[in-house]
């Protein structure tokens, strides 16, 4: 039970102290100027404790920056690229606006103001949506930890992305782009590339166009994943850059799959990988080295 005690201050004034024990039996107190205020608080704290809704005021006084860091710690099991993206959102968009704000003071009006300011700064709907998502996760961490009673982000709406029609190239258009990449117009300029043809780049265009593999999946693709007898490619790995290094790990959504290869593409690949070892990368950098040579780490 909460109790109310009258206290005389050194200056001769009167304060009313509410003393109670939290759910963990820890001694707590809060001081008020008026007895009526103390009585209302005593009644509310007793109700909150009995309902299991009591919040530790010390946790609510911790800054948003503190809770953002506590949440980032929980992302250790995610892919490095995802972790880096989350930290970038926190550091570049949320901390400059909320870092020192006590988390209990982050209400619906403040959240709406922050998202509106970011939107007015020129950020697109997708970017604002991502920032809102991270803000939601940070405040949810605070809520689950007992710092706040409700997550104000839940009462906001994510901005809608404008509809964009998807553009699909025809086989003829893919071949045309491939030819332009393979044999670009020559220029008699000092310092131009000594080569005049880049057939391996044209092959990459055709491979991407006819298989639908993502850029990261093509970067991580090894020779052993090509089955040119059955004309299939097994998508086993994907590459992404995070923290300045190329990270090799499972494909997006962790789903491995097999994709058919057109006969002509399989023939071109057979020529392209001739002399390569099974664990060599199918596609390499412009200088002939694999993109994952010296800086790749396994995610």
Image (cartoon, helix red, strand yellow):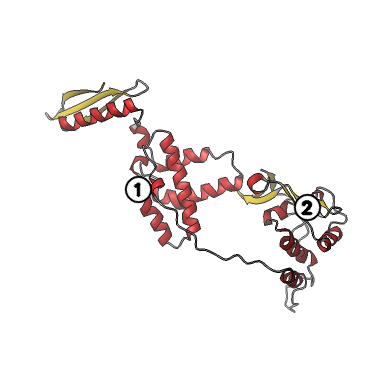
Answer whether labels 2 and 1 touch (C-beta < 8 Å). Answer: no
Q: Name the residue nearer the viewer: 108 or 278.
A: 108
Tag shown at residue 133: none
Residue behind mark 2: 233
Q: Is residue 108 left or right of residue 35?
A: right
Position above or below: 105 against 184: above
Is the N terminus in the top left, top right, bottom left or bottom right quadrant?
Answer: top left
Count of numbered tags: 2
Q: Secondary structure at mark 2?
A: strand
Q: Is residue 128 left or right of residue 243?
A: left
**For mark 2, does the 10 Å Cα neighbourhood hold few (<14), some (14 to 19), or many (20 or more) residues?**
many
Q: Quadrant of residue 147?
A: top left
- State the image coordinates of residue 218 (x, y, percent, origin top left): 72, 55
Q: Name the residue nearer the viewer: 242 or 107.
A: 107
Q: Is residue 82 left or right of residue 182?
A: left
Q: CA distance from mark 2 to mark 1?
A: 50 Å
Image point 33% across, 33% down: which residue?
57
Is the C terminus in the top left, top right, bottom left or bottom right quadrant?
Answer: top right
- State the image coordinates of residue 23 (x, y, percent, origin top left): 36, 23
- State the image coordinates of residue 102 (x, y, percent, origin top left): 35, 41
Residue behind mark 1: 108
Position above or below: 182 against 188: above
């Amino acid at each position: 039970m909460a109790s109310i005690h009258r206290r005389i201050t050194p200056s001769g004034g009167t304060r009313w102290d509410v003393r109670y024990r939290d759910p963990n039996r820890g001694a707590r107190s809060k001081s008020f100027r008026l007895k009526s205020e103390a009585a209302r608080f005593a009644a509310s704290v007793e109700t909150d404790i009995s309902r299991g809704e009591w919040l530790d005021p010390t946790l609510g006084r911790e800054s948003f920056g503190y809770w953002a860091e506590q949440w980032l710690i929980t992302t250790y099991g995610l892919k490095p690229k995802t972790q880096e993206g989350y930290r970038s959102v926190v550091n570049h968009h949320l901390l400059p606006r909320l870092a020192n704000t006590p988390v209990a003071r982050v209400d619906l009006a403040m959240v709406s103001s922050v998202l509106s300011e970011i939107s007015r700064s020129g950020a697109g709907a997708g970017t604002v949506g991502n920032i809102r998502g991270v803000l939601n996760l940070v405040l949810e961490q605070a809520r689950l930890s007992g710092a706040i009673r409700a997550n104000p982000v839940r009462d906001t709406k994510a901005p809608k992305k404008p509809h964009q029609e998807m553009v699909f190239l025809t086989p003829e258009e893919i071949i045309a782009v491939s030819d332009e990449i393979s044999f670009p117009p020559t220029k008699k300029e000092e310092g131009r590339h000594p080569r005049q043809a880049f057939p391996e780049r044209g092959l990459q265009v055709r491979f991407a166009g006819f298989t639908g593999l993502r850029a990261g999946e093509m970067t991580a693709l090894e020779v052993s994943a090509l089955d040119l007898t059955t004309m299939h490619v097994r998508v086993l790995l994907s590459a992404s850059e995070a923290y300045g290094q190329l990270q090799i790990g499972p494909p997006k959504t962790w789903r491995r799959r097999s994709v058919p290869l057109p006969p002509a593409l399989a023939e071109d690949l057979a020529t392209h990988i001739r002399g390569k070892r099974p664990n060599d990368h199918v596609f390499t950098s412009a200088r002939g080295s694999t993109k994952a040579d010296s800086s790749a780490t396994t995610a």
